[in-house]
Image (spheres, rainbow, N blue to C red):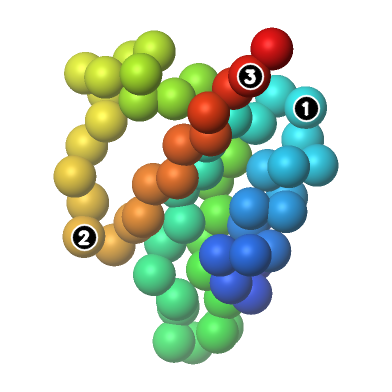
């Protein structure tokens, strides 16, 4: 989905019960928005799947029960 900034992407994650981490892509100069990817797992659960990509920033949540 598209988000205007990191705050909006984090809000979208917060509003989704299954979201525990997100990837946000650097702003697209054409549209002025960021690609926001919501994830249902974190790097702690699937450490081998975490890839370094200069175009994306990763944010993981600390799940507390």
Q: Please, what secondary structure does the residue beneath circle 2 have? A: loop
59 on left or right of 14: left
Q: Nearer the viewer, mark 2 or mark 3?
A: 3
Q: How far is the residue under mark 2 from the one under mark 3?
A: 30 Å
The residue under the point 27% across, 30% down is 50
* Quadrant of the drawing holding the C terminus: top right
Q: Dot 1 surroundings within 10 Å: few (below 14), some, or many (20 or more)?
A: few
Q: How far is the residue under mark 1 from the one under mark 2?
A: 28 Å
> Residue 51 versus residue 1: which sits nearer the camera?
51
Q: Nearer the viewer, mark 1 or mark 2?
A: 1
Q: Position of residue 59 (x, y in %)?
A: 45, 45
The residue under the point 42% across, 61% down is 25
Sequence-wise, the earlier of marks 2 and 3 is 2
Q: Position of residue 54 (x, y in %)?
A: 21, 60
50 on left or right of 38: left
Q: How far is the residue under mark 3 from the one under mark 1?
A: 13 Å
Sequence-wise, the earlier of marks 3 and 1 is 1
Give the number of the disc on residue 64. Answer: 3
Q: Dot 3 surroundings within 10 Å: few (below 14), some, or many (20 or more)?
A: few
- Residue 19, quarter of the rendered image: top right
User: In the figure, 43 relative to 29: above or below?
Assistant: above
Which residue is tagged 2? 54
- Residue 64, quarter of the rendered image: top right
> Residue 22 versus residue 62: which sits nearer the camera?
62
* Quadrant of the drawing holding the N terminus: bottom right
Q: Please, what secondary structure does the residue beneath circle 1 have? A: loop
Q: Dots 1 and 2: beta carbons under 8 Å? A: no
Which residue is tagged 1? 17
Sequence-wise, the earlier of marks 1 and 2 is 1
């Amino acid at each position: 989905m598209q988000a205007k900034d990191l705050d909006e992407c984090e809000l979208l994650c917060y509003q989704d019960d299954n979201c525990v981490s997100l990837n946000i892509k650097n702003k697209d100069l054409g549209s002025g928005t960021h690609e926001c990817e919501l994830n249902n797992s974190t790097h702690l659960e699937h450490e081998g799947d975490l890839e370094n990509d200069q175009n994306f920033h990763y944010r993981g949540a600390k799940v507390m029960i």
